[in-house]
Amino acid sequence: KDMMILDVASGDLNKDKLEDALLIIQPENYEEDGNADRPVLVLIGQEDGTMKLAAQGNDAIMCYGCGGMKGDRKVKNLK
């Protein structure tokens, strides 16, 4: 599936003076597949400037169809 970034926050999560990031992603065709996962990715900055995936949580953010009567609980600014 093609994925898109829904929200991102950055900072030094592990206190190594390198920029790290949290991303929430979702499928590009999310409205067509309202029960798809919205994974949270934890990326740790490396000394060479790249980022390494340290953790992924597929159940942290509710899917579009999982909000019940309240509907989709959109992500309200990760920062």
Image: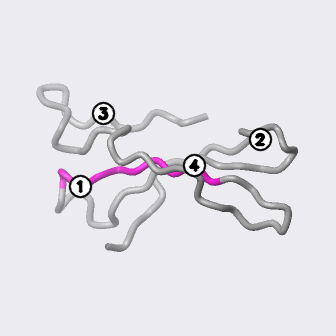
Q: Disc 1 on helix, strand or loop? A: loop
Task: Looking at this view, name the residue that lies furthest to the left.
Answer: 69
Q: Of the residues tagged 3 and 1, which is closer to the observer?
A: 1
Label 4 environment density (alpha carbons within 10 Å; few <14, some 14–19, many ≥20): many
- What residue would you read off at disc 4? 42
Q: Nearer the viewer, residue 63 or 70?
A: 63
Determine the CA span between mark 1 and mark 2.
30 Å
- What residue would you read off at disc 1? 36
Q: Nearer the viewer, residue 6 or 61?
A: 61
Asked if the residues shown at circle 3 and circle 2 are in contact, with their CB atoms under 8 angstroms apart, the answer is no
| Magenta highlight on residue 39 | yes
Above or below for 70 versus 10: above
Q: Residue at x 16, y 43 (%)?
A: 65
Q: Disc 4 on helix, strand or loop? A: strand
Rendered image quadrant of residue 1? bottom left
Q: Amino acid at mark 4?
A: Val
Label 2 environment density (alpha carbons within 10 Å; few <14, some 14–19, many ≥20): few
Residue 48 placement, left or right of 58: right
Asked if the residues shown at circle 2 and circle 4 are in contact, with their CB atoms under 8 angstroms apart, the answer is no
Where's residue 44, x and y in %? 69, 53
Q: Residue at x 35, y 50 (%)?
A: 38
Q: Amino acid at mark 2?
A: Asp
- What residue would you read off at disc 3? 73
